[in-house]
Image (cartoon, grey):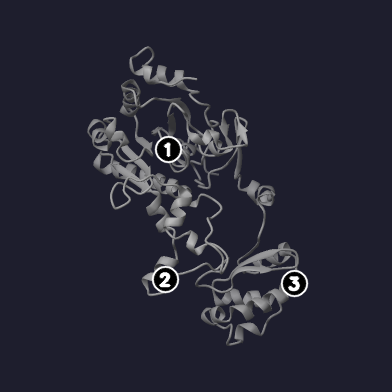
Amino acid sequence: MTEQSATGALEGLLVIDASRVLGGPYCGQILGDHGARVIKVEPPQGDETRLWGPPFHGDGASYYQGLNRNKEGIALDFSREEGREFLMHLLEGADVFIENFKTGTLEKWGIGREELRKRFPRLVHARVSGFGEDGPYGGRPGYDAAIQALVGIMSVNGEVGGKPQRVGVPVVDMVTGLNAALGIMLALQERHRSGLGQFVEASLYDCGFSLMHPHLPNMYLGAPVPGRSGNAHPNITPYDTYAAQDGDVFLAVGNNGQFANLCKVLGLDDMPSDERFSTNANRKENRPLLRERLEAAMASWTAEAIAEKLITSGVPAAPVRSLDQVIADPHTHARKMIVDTEGVRGTASPIKLERTPATYRKAPPAFGQHTDQVTEEFGLTGSKAAEGLVRR
């Protein structure tokens, strides 16, 4: 059995996370889960997600609690010189600085990217932004749902003939946080070679645009502008929800072998050799008839039973479930995807490292919880810079 580290792959890394809302804090939590020391710096009014409830735990809503584990918390007023000076003291020993200020804000305060590069040449400065610095939309603020609308995600999400729909989770914010964390790790790896940090930017617009697969590659090769297709895949059939006796089952049949297995389980042995269904292109052409035959064969099965039979027979399939069912699933618990940290329940890291797994050491901090500890440790107790701290 391989010995495990109790500290994580990023032990020794100091991250100053001055971001708010979702993408930046999620990035910081990823780094914190894997051993980095993360100091969360909030503005005087606090991270606004503290108020995005109910439900609430302590002084933070569930939204805040889900994104700020494994962090220490202080609050600084960057509009004051003392607050900015306190930040500079923190950055002197930091490896990473995460922020999501609107373009030009830090420059207005005299601590923009060029100033930080000069003062801290080894610092990896990561910004989560709406649209990036340049281009026609450069510098604009960005919000997940608005980006979903702008980059076309809503245009392909929804029922056939229905109105565009927002995806029910903040997928753009989440993937932007992931890409920011990936960019930070790339920059840290390159620093081993050059000895220098660099500016890393993950914008919601870029990340949202990057999610449009396979629709963009289809259009690059001349396909028409896609519309909404419900749960159906634009390229693959059967790849959709189908009705069973008591609910829906999602079939994700990606090749002819899987289709043959599907037909065998359902007692439709003639279909793989039927020219109308023998290839994916033909199945796509005959989707209505294919649906009719599949659902007739599935009508005597419960969704759970047929999905289990299919997946164990080599056919990608799953019942369409509600979130309470997912939380109760033994596999969720076997994978240790729900964790309790100092009385706060959260979703565990999906990144599994064998020797240096994620650890859950600190609950999300209350507002300014670690002010005295951080001030003393950085030798700022009684200093002029400490006047920039915000206390409640």
| Residue at the extreme top of the image, as rendered | 382
Task: Say which quarter of the image contains residue 337.
Answer: top right
Residues at marks 1 and 3 touching, judged by CB atoms closer than 8 Å: no
Farthest left residue in view: 118
Structural distance between the alpha carbons of marks 1 and 2: 39 Å
Direction from residue 239 to residue 93 in the image, left or right = left
**Which of the pair 44/240 is nearer the observer?**
44
Instruction: Assess whether mark 2 and mark 3 are in contact (beta carbons under 8 angstroms).
Output: no
Residue 29 at x, y percent in the picture: 48, 38
Q: Earlier in the sequence, mark 1 or mark 3?
A: 1
The residue that label 3 is drawn on is: 299
Q: Position of residue 119 (x, y in %)?
A: 24, 30
Q: Where 275 sits versus 293, above or below?
A: below
Tag nearer the camera, 1 or 2: 2
Label 2 Cα crowd, 10 Å radius (few <14 / some 14-19 / many 20+): some
Residue 103: quadrant of the picture: top left
Query: Which marked residue is nearer to the observer: mark 1 or mark 3?
Result: 3
Q: Which residue is mark 2?
A: 218
Q: Secondary structure at mark 1?
A: loop
Q: Position of residue 223 (x, y in %)?
A: 41, 74
Q: Which residue is mark 1?
A: 10
At label 3, counting other C-alpha atoms closer than 10 Å, the crowd grade (few under 14, some 14-19, many 20 or more) is some
Query: For the residue marked with disc 1, what is the amino acid?
Result: Leu
**Mark 1 vs 2, N-terminal side:** 1
Which comes sooner in the sequence, label 3 or label 2?
2
